[in-house]
């Protein structure tokens, strides 16, 4: 690997412990529409755009894609359900890891399938001065969400980076797949209920049980990258 210049962070389940809220909101909203999406399955779809997740369930149960109106209504209801929760806490270890990265002159940025403005605003509140808005990639920037590599390829383009000058930190199988397909060294942190093997099968180069564990082993990770 050449010189590490940037670390590309997924947001939900990596920087914020928000995934339990998302899984619950998806499950409840789908159920209200007579559609079935278990909380565990919500973790498997994590990283997709809202429309992507809704269409998978529509195709499975109704044999068709949802209309633009249906997508807008369901995603709006899901956002309301999500926002009933208390604010998602910072993931333990995330702030400490970001401070280490920043102190080393490496640029952290965020690559998320989220289109929730509320959560994007919280980034600056919870991680003051860490992220530059113009380098971030959100649901509003991409045509193809994760597992398509486009979000990570766009992050490289925005940062003027080559694939071997960055690493990805992800908790979701689809996000890991996207980072891997983009040709970027991808670290998985298994902060949800899934079997870690699923993340390795998706293409993770390293697997940690938590952000705190990754933070604690950061020096070792950098050594491994230099080999």
Image: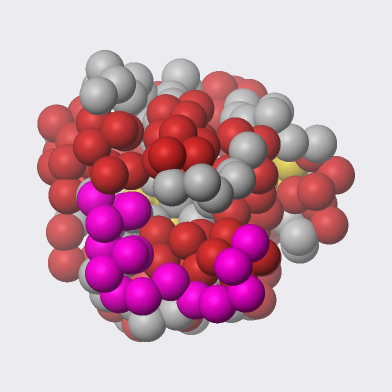
Q: Is residue 65 magenta?
A: yes
Which residue is located at x 26 percent, y 62 percent? 72
Which residue is located at x 58 percent, y 60 percent? 57
Q: Quadrant of the C terminus?
A: bottom right
Q: Position of residue 49 (x, y in %)?
A: 42, 63
First to last magenta residue range: 61-76
- Quadrant of the rendered structure where residue 87 is? top left
- Rendered position, 223 above or below 203: above
Which residue is located at x 76 percent, y 60 percent? 202
- Rendered position, 198 above or below 140: above
Q: Position of residue 54 (x, y in %)?
A: 47, 61
Q: Is residue 161 visible?
A: no
3 or 83, nearer to the observer? 83
145 or 159, nearer to the observer? 145
- Rendered position, 161 above or below 83: below
Way the structure is coloured: secondary structure
Q: Is residue 22 magenta?
A: no
């Amino acid at each position: 690997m050449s010189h590490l210049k940037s670390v590309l962070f997924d947001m939900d389940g990596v920087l914020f412990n928000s995934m339990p809220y998302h899984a619950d909101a998806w499950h409840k909203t789908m159920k209200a529409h007579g559609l079935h999406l278990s909380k565990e399955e919500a973790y498997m779809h994590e990283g997709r755009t809202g429309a992507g997740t809704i269409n998978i369930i529509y195709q499975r149960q109704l044999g068709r894609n949802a209309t633009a109106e249906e997508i807008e209504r369901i995603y709006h209801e899901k956002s309301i359900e999500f926002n009933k929760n208390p604010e998602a806490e910072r993931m333990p270890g995330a702030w400490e890891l970001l401070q280490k990265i920043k102190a080393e002159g490496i640029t952290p940025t965020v690559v998320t399938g989220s289109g929730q403005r509320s959560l994007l605003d919280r980034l600056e509140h919870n991680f003051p001065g860490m992220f530059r808005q113009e380098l971030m990639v959100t649901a509003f920037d991409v045509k193809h969400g994760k597992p398509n590599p486009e979000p990570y390829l766009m992050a490289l383009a925005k940062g003027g980076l080559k694939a071997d000058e960055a690493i990805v930190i992800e908790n979701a199988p689809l996000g890991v797949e996207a980072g891997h397909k983009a040709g970027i060294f991808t670290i998985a942190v298994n902060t949800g209920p899934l079997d870690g093997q699923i993340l390795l099968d998706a293409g993770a180069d390293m697997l940690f049980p938590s952000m705190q564990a990754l933070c604690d082993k950061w020096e070792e990770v950098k050594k491994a990258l230099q080999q």
